Amino acid sequence: DQQVKQNSPSLSVQEGRISILNCDYTNSMFDYFLWYKKYPAEGPTFLISISSIKDKNEDGRFTVFLNKSAKHLSLHIVPSQPGDSAVYFCAEKTSYDKVIFGPGTSLSVIP
Amino acid sequence: DSGVTQTPKHLITATGQRVTLRCSPRSGDLSVYWYQQSLDQGLQFLIQYYNGEERAKGNILERFSAQQFPDLHSELNLSSLELGDSALYFCASSVGRTGELFFGEGSRLTVL
């Protein structure tokens, strides 16, 4: 069964420091991993993705790292800003077009 | 604004009833996904349609059904409702196959 795990339900970081959000997965047959951000009372919004053939993707303050041997990926936010406070979901896009979400990590960036 | 429209935004009904949630995808998007988010839970994948055909299925209950119409809008039908069906139901659409989804604001269903 496909599983996407985010073992930290919450994370607090000081403004300006690095935020590192982690995600583990069990299914090796994926095309992409994606990160979504969700504010209360809104739908999730796409943040950044990485394909299965890469180990790093960077977009401005956001970088995603993929370690296929460990079945682990992480999202780095540098520098963290108060507006980054939200719930972050890791999601797996499989070869069969399913997009499976992890349970989410709530990030609080403290001014 | 993601371009995905979901109606109704809020719905309160009683156990045993049936409701229909509607989703209009972004213009040009052929895929529609449905997700359920219960209180303090993650997004549970229900079902995906592509250009009118069912493409992928998740843990969707037999009491639930969905379809995508020729104009590409989609409906999620929930019947014999139970208290545990109270949740936020999200629809998302996409144009490609990268997993980049555009979500609506959700339909909040409360079953009393």
Image (tube, coloured by chain):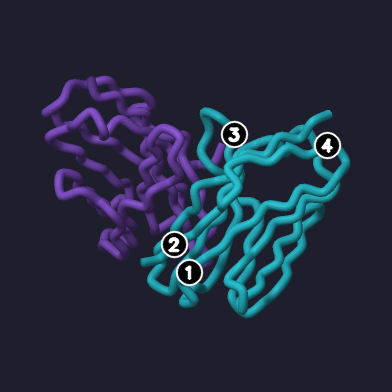
N-term mark: 3 or 2:
2
> What residue did someone put label 1 on?
A26
In the displayed structure, B31 sits above or below B105; it is below
Name the side, left or right, on which B75 lies relative to B39.
Answer: left
Crowd tier of the residue under label 3, counting other residues whose Cα lies within 10 Å: few below 14, some 14–19, many 20 or above: some
User: What residue is rendered at 63% in x and 62% in y?
Assistant: A49
- Quarter of the figure with residue B10: top left
Q: Amino acid at mark 2?
A: Gln
Q: Amino acid at mark 3?
A: Tyr
> What residue did someone put label 4 on?
A14
Chain containing the residue with disc 4: A
Give the Cα separation between the discs numbered 3 and 4: 19 Å
Number of the front mark, 3 or 4: 4
N-term mark: 1 or 3:
1
Report helix, strand or loop for mark 2.
Answer: loop
Report helix, strand or loop for mark 4.
Answer: strand
Chain containing the residue with disc 2: A
Crowd tier of the residue under label 4, counting other residues whose Cα lies within 10 Å: few below 14, some 14–19, many 20 or above: some
N-term mark: 4 or 2:
2
Name the side, left or right, on which A16 lies relative to B67.
Answer: right
Circles 2 and 1 in contact, beta carbons < 8 Å: yes
User: What residue is rendered at 40% in x and 65% in y?
Assistant: A2
User: What residue is rendered at 15% in x and 44% in y?
Assistant: B63
Is A102 or A33 nearer to us in this picture? A102
- Quarter of the figure with residue B85: top left
Chain B colour as displayed? purple
> What residue did someone put label 2 on?
A3
